[in-house]
Image (cartoon, grey):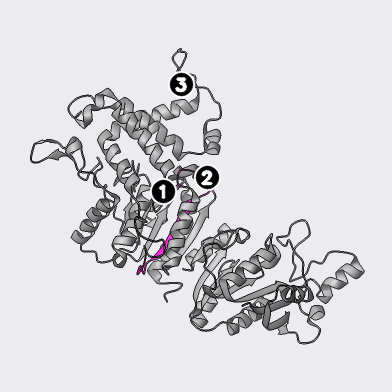
Amino acid sequence: MVLHALSGDSHTADQGGWWENLIGPGKGIDTDKYFVICSNVIGGCRGSTGPSSVNPLTGKPYGLSFPLISIHDMVEAQRHLVDFLGIEKLLSVVGGSMGGMQVLQWMVSYPKRIRSAIPIATTLKHTPQQIAFNEVGRQAVMSDPDWKNGAYYGHSSPAKGLALARMIGHITYMSDISMTEKFGRKIRHDKEPFKFSADFEVEGYLHYRGDNFVKRFDANSYLYLTKAIDNFNLLNGHGLANIFEGLKAKVLVLAFKSDWLYPTYQSQEIVKACKLSGVEASYCEINSTYGHDAFLLEITKETQLIEGFLKAVSNGNGQHQ
Amino acid sequence: MTKQTQVIEHKVISRWINSGANVLDLGCGDGELLSLLIRNKHVHAQGVELSDQAINTCVAAGLNVYQQDIDTGLTEYADKSIDFVILNQTLQQVRKPDLAIKEALRVGKKVIVGFPNFCYITDRFSIFFRGKVPVTSSLPYEWYDTPNLHFLSITDFKEYCSKINVTIEDQIFISKNHTVKILPNLFAEVGLFLLSKH
């Protein structure tokens, strides 16, 4: 089961999918061998019910009457789906960032229903710095006059605020090196003459990312999902040593050296929790300059690790022979 | 390191380790030794390794590995939490061998150390007669392209053990495809030690 991140959706494989190079026939997650499930998270806007869905009681979109959701709720919805499909045990749950949080939640909530887990570039709990960036994003949305306390459906949406939130997000997904390599100080030539126009390519890129995001994402979903991420804390009242107690699944934790939004120490903490609970875990720190975005971009390196890991799990190689 | 020598090394290590023990291999490479110990001794195996390629191989073999630089310490392991910590052909390549050994002794109830003996007779010949730093089967690298940072002899290591009050519980010396009983510091290519410290 593949679990998507904040702005992802169920369209993970095939053309245009956010992991299209990792999932498919003969690829790292080989669809000739494995059956892949990916559903949109609850609270999102690309399938499952969220604030932009119509409330059957009122006939209008939920807006802010939609209840706050958690990472745990997302996993509950996925568990219902797995029940519906009649699957007792998943070969693996895999995902990065917010998807990785769902992986960790699966490990805690349904340890007996997974044979393995691959949390990527993620954390056991959101830190103040991570919460701070999300709050700035939310404030950007909510300070847009078009937001109207979330009741903007049928009117113009808070596009400026959501685009700004996305621009801030994208800065945190990249790294100093990846931005320098991608943009340098290159100047755009298609600009309108204006003192503060987006002269540099990096500015144009952020505008492009922001504007594109608005076309496919609901501003209220952005608020609900970022809040779910911020509230995520598996250590709440639990010691590192016992959060994964009783888990028999094999775990592969992946992190990226240049990821400063979800730094490698957070992934190391996941492995430490596994070790303290006697869970079989491997930790790989992938050398990448892409920052947090690396989990979507370092496909070759992820393929090598995930392909071998899944094969070992499905063949029962290694420790459990 | 010739394949023959490695086979004997692995046999010796395998003999020292109890069935079902907890084993941590520091610098586990592609995990050959750990896989052997899982097969023959049903150990609970963990490895630490730095190389990307080796990590990929270990993961595909179903081993539990942690990509880490040993020089940063083993902070995630509690005192005496591992039955056997292995430092085989690793010590000469870490920046701080002293820290690696002390951390291994803190974490492990027993520690196995194996390294190439720099005072092996061929090495001595190379330095004495040819005036050249040795390039041999146990030290197969040119000076300008070697992962080896430290060069030690069997005698050096024994002196070090007594200096830090470590008990040598067993020691085996290997050359080519046989063990060496006489004058190991001269005739052995590899020294293997089983250590403990209370």
Residue located at (23% from left, 24% from top): A156
Q: Is residue A165 left or right of residue B137?
A: left
Q: Which residue is mark 3?
A: A198
Quadrant holding the N terminus of chain B: bottom right
Q: Amino acid at mark 3?
A: Ala
x%, y% of residue A121? 44, 50
Residue A307 vs residue A161, the one in the foreground: A161
Residue B14 vs residue A29, the one in the foreground: B14
> Tag 3: Cα neighbours inside 10 Å, few (<14), some, or many (≥20)?
some
Which residue is most to the bottom?
A: B181
* SS for callout 2: loop
Q: Are marks 1 and 2 in contact (CB under 8 Å)?
A: no
Q: Which residue is mark 1?
A: A21
State the CA–CA distance, disc 3 to disc 1.
Answer: 32 Å
- Residue A258, numbered label: 2
- Per the rendered image, the range of residues in magenta is A245-262
x%, y% of residue A275? 45, 66
User: How many numbered callouts?
Assistant: 3
Residue located at (54% from left, 84% from top): B18
x%, y% of residue B24? 55, 71
x%, y% of residue A21? 41, 48
Comes first in the chain, label 3 or label 1 = 1
Which chain does the numbered disc 2 sit on?
A
Q: Is residue A264 magenta?
A: no
Q: Nearer the viewer, mark 3 or mark 2?
A: 2
Whether residue A26 is visible, yes or no, is: no
> Tag 2: Cα neighbours inside 10 Å, few (<14), some, or many (≥20)?
many
Q: Amino acid at mark 1?
A: Asn
> Tag 1: Cα neighbours inside 10 Å, few (<14), some, or many (≥20)?
many
Q: Nearer the viewer, mark 3 or mark 1?
A: 3
Q: Amino acid at mark 2?
A: Ser
